[in-house]
Image (cartoon, rainbow, N blue to C red):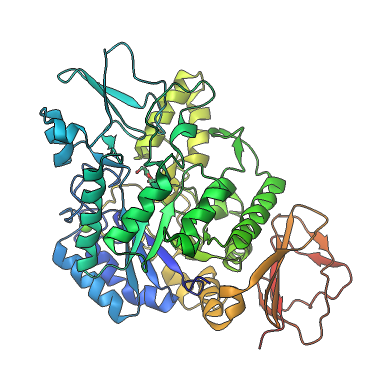
Amino acid sequence: MADFGDKVVYQIYPKSFRDTNGDGFGDIPGVIEKLDYLQELGVDYLWLTPFFPSPQRDNGYDVADYRSISPQFGTMEDLENLIRQSRERGMGIMLDMVFNHTSTRHEWFQKALAGDEEYQNYYIFKEGTPDHAPTNWKSKFGGTAWEYVPELKKWYLHLYDVTQADLNWDNPGVREELKEILRFWKEKGIRAFRFDVINLVSKPGQMEDDFEGDGRRFYSDGPHIHAYLKELVKDAGIADFVTVGEMSSTSLEHCIRYSAPEEKELSMCFNFHHLKVDYKDGDKWALNPVDYKKLKELFVEWQTGMQEGGGWNALFWCNHDQPRIVSRMGNEGIYWKESAKMLAGMIHFMRGTPYIYQGEEIGMQNAHYPSIERYRDVESLNYYQILLEEGKTKEEALEILAARSRDNGRTPMQWNGERYGGFSGEEPWIPMSAAFRKEITVEAQQNDEDSVLAFYKKLIAMRKKYPVIAKGEISFLETETDLVLAYRRELGEQQMIVICNLDGRKQRVIVPGERSGWRILLENYKGREIPLEEMYTMEPYEFMVLGNVK
Ligand code: GLC
Ligand code: CA
């Protein structure tokens, strides 16, 4: 049994967390400044997205040097302070390793460009003529996945931005370099890693056109992925670290293998299937209402499937690539608080390790930017153009971005009610959310027992207190409607039942089971009756945990 079931990870996007020197960019000293807050929240690990030297084309996911700190974020000394001061407070730092690609500014790529064949073999270069790319694969940020370098008469592969060149993992020298980077950070006291799009690193030997899709079926969970991960983990000596792999378009079968302890690959996996239930035919850039039937089926499949296969899930709604969950599946109006709590509770009681993304714990909402000038994200700016080229009006394109842009999750953290939310005294690199208001700040919620923040603290505290949450079995209960999700957790005699109304309308449910010795352990409406076996009417977004635990 995994021993990190009682742990909670908090994700920090440093650029938007807290700016201490007034340049409008969040920095590492800003994270240090907020350590007391994070300790009080009760989290165990702080995952920081990349702060390495980078041209920032993709906000740091274009790494130019994996062993130092970008001056924008601070110094190595700042990071060492952060590691030490976190440790003193019982928290570990989780570093974000971007190993599928490097920035084209990285010294390896620069040497490749200068004609060094050894370094060309670090990347995926293919000879060819400018009129014909090696395959028809698409970049995940729009357009072709290949770029021609006339001086070399070669194309290179970039699954993301043109400045993010894919590494050639089939080259043992590349794998050795990456292990060295992990050893370097291990020396610095790091004991947890997140691996960016790690299931995309093993490309097929023969690359062919994809006439059914964008090419992803050839390289997602690619041919040698499990062997490469095992080797990396073993040789870098990180088998007993907390590791999480970000898995793009993956499958349950592969995630079981990535995370089952006996495989000695990773501790757990992020998958994104549950965050595509509002895509239209899989297209992120086409709006659709949330398909609750599908959402429920996916939770049942992944929760019970990972349990049966011995794998371990990372539980999450939000990150720096996703819109805010309360805006997406909850309510921004009168049920803002109730829905934010319900959505949190819904995943925190599932089997896995929960991740909280900065601002989620205070119910932060989407950016609601009224014009394209406010957007910063390379993907959003690319797709805005693509949508216009496809014939959408500016209004339509902006409406799609408002729902889908990654910038929704990147607006400055709202600490207090000042002009820039206490993020900075100066104008931030990215505008505040237009939904920013006093109620949605740490300051306003800190001393309020009924706040979203207080609710997150309870969720974390309960996980530490009741082993049934960290270790119990999960099974789902039948409900008459897909708008109600209910499940049971069990560990020996200990039991909990979690019931969530996913909708803004009342729902009627019957909860099975005997109730003697049971009580309500957590709820988002005050003073509810314990629903006996008769019909119970749930309020909009009502959430309740019942149990017999002491
Ligand atoms: C991951 C990151 C995302 C980045 C991409 C390419 O999905 O979370 O922010 O753009 O990888 O590195
Ligand atoms: Ca700064």
How many marks the image carries: the answer is 0
Q: Residue at x 67, y 84 (%)?
A: 549
| View quadrant of ligand 2 | bottom left
> To which quarter of the image does residue 116 belong?
top left
Image coordinates of residue 9 in percent, x first then y, are 43, 66
Above or below, comparing residue 249 to residue 518 in the picture: above
Task: Give the camera-side residue of 454 and 64.
Answer: 64
Asked whether residue 195 appears in the rendered view, the answer is: no
Asked whether residue 328 appears in the rendered view, the answer is: yes
Above or below, comparing residue 384 to residue 189 in the picture: above
Above or below, comparing residue 81 to residue 381 in the picture: below
Q: Is residue 11 left or right of residue 32?
A: right
> To which quarter of the image does residue 348 belong?
bottom right
Q: Residue at x 62, y 77 (%)?
A: 468
Image coordinates of residue 134 in percent, x first then y, are 34, 20
Above or below, comparing residue 68 to residue 217 in the picture: below
Image coordinates of residue 500 in percent, x first then y, are 70, 63
Q: Residue at x 32, y 60 (%)?
A: 234
> To which quarter of the image does residue 349 belong?
bottom right
Task: Give the camera-side residue of 356 and 113.
Answer: 113
Q: Is residue 72 left or right of residue 415?
A: left
| Extreme residue in the right direction | 534
Task: Give the camera-side residue of 224 and 442.
Answer: 224
Q: Quadrant of the C terminus?
A: bottom right
Image coordinates of residue 345 in percent, x first then y, are 60, 67
Task: Give the camera-side residue of 168 and 250.
Answer: 168
Q: Residue at x 29, y 64 (%)?
A: 237
